[in-house]
Image (cartoon, rainbow, N blue to C red):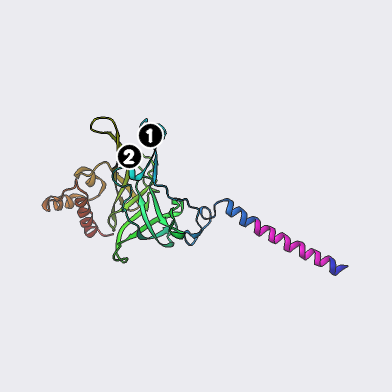
Amino acid sequence: MRKKGMKHAAMFIIVNIVALLFGISTFAQMQGGVSYLPVPDLSAATYTLAVHEINFEGVSNLGKQRLFYDQVKGSPFFYEEFHQAEIFMKDGRSMGKYMVKFNLLTQEFHFLGKDKAEMVVPNDIVRKIVVYDKNDTAVHKAVFVRTLDFTTTGGKPIGEYAEQLNSGNAILYKVSKKNVVTADSLFGTLKRYYFGTTDAYFVGMNGRVTQLKKLSDDFIFTALPAVGKLEDWARKNKINLKKEEGVLALLHQWNASFKQ
């Protein structure tokens, strides 16, 4: 009788362990798995299919209207074609390399999943995405970081992706967004739609990110300390700080002159 009782007790313990493990597994599935637990790659992630249409509901008094991307002139994507890219998690770990393209309208990265299905990368687990050149995967074509710490000049969080345009102590970031612009046709009988782009620039230094209201001498030099020598250098070399390439040239000089 004692052996039988011990056997029943052991079975009871095993059943409870199985139930506990099943409960943990079920809870993880209910929570979407990857959004709450670390994952090594996107294979276990909670993701959705990419949608190639725009919902106009509540926008520009157009009412409830949907348009496919091919009904709008231009493209909502940073690169129209898929490029190989490496995706990094918030803790810096790599999730692997995937074929991606960046949707500037929705601020989402599309990636090719199983059976070439076009899916959306879950933003809540991503910190950085490095896009490689199509012809040479050793070359970085573009680097995007989540703007978790970026705020506007009014103090509002950005919460989008920013393109990191250079490296060094002083970094220029660009947040680009696509939106749909409408216009009447020549005789006013039809609506025309096209993708417009807005850009916002930020300078990052020593963990602090400052928005530039616009690209100009005043705003650039205000964002950078010890500006005297750089002002002379920029004037001597005819650097146009109203253009992106001019600001990048200045930051390159800054990083070379004031290494920390």
- 33 or 112, which lies in front? 112
**Which quarter of the rendered picture does the N terminus lie within?**
bottom right
- Residue 251: percent from left, percent from top: 23, 54
As drawn, which residue projects farthest toward the right? 1
Kindly identify which residue carries mark 2: 180
Q: CA distance from mark 2 to mark 1?
A: 10 Å
Kindly identify which residue carries mark 1: 59
**Which quarter of the rendered picture does the C terminus lie within?**
bottom left
- Residue 183: percent from left, percent from top: 28, 34
Characterize the magenta stretch by its predominant secondary structure: helix
- 139 or 213, which lies in front? 139
Q: Is residue 76 above or below residue 139?
A: above
Q: Residue 249 appears in which quarter of the rendering?
A: bottom left
What's under tag 1, amino acid-wise? Answer: Val
What's under tag 2, amino acid-wise? Answer: Val
- 218 or 141, which lies in front? 141
Specify the segment rendered in magenta: 5-22
* Left or right: residue 110 compared with residue 235: right
Query: Under tag 1, what secondary structure?
Result: loop
**Category of crowding for the residue at label 1, using alpha-carbon neighbours closer than 10 angstroms: few (below 14), some (14–19), many (at least 20):** few
Q: Is residue 139 above or below residue 64?
A: below
- Residue 12: percent from left, percent from top: 76, 61
Q: Residue 19 appears in which quarter of the rendering?
A: bottom right
- The circle on residue 15 is none
Which residue: 34% across, 47% down? Answer: 104
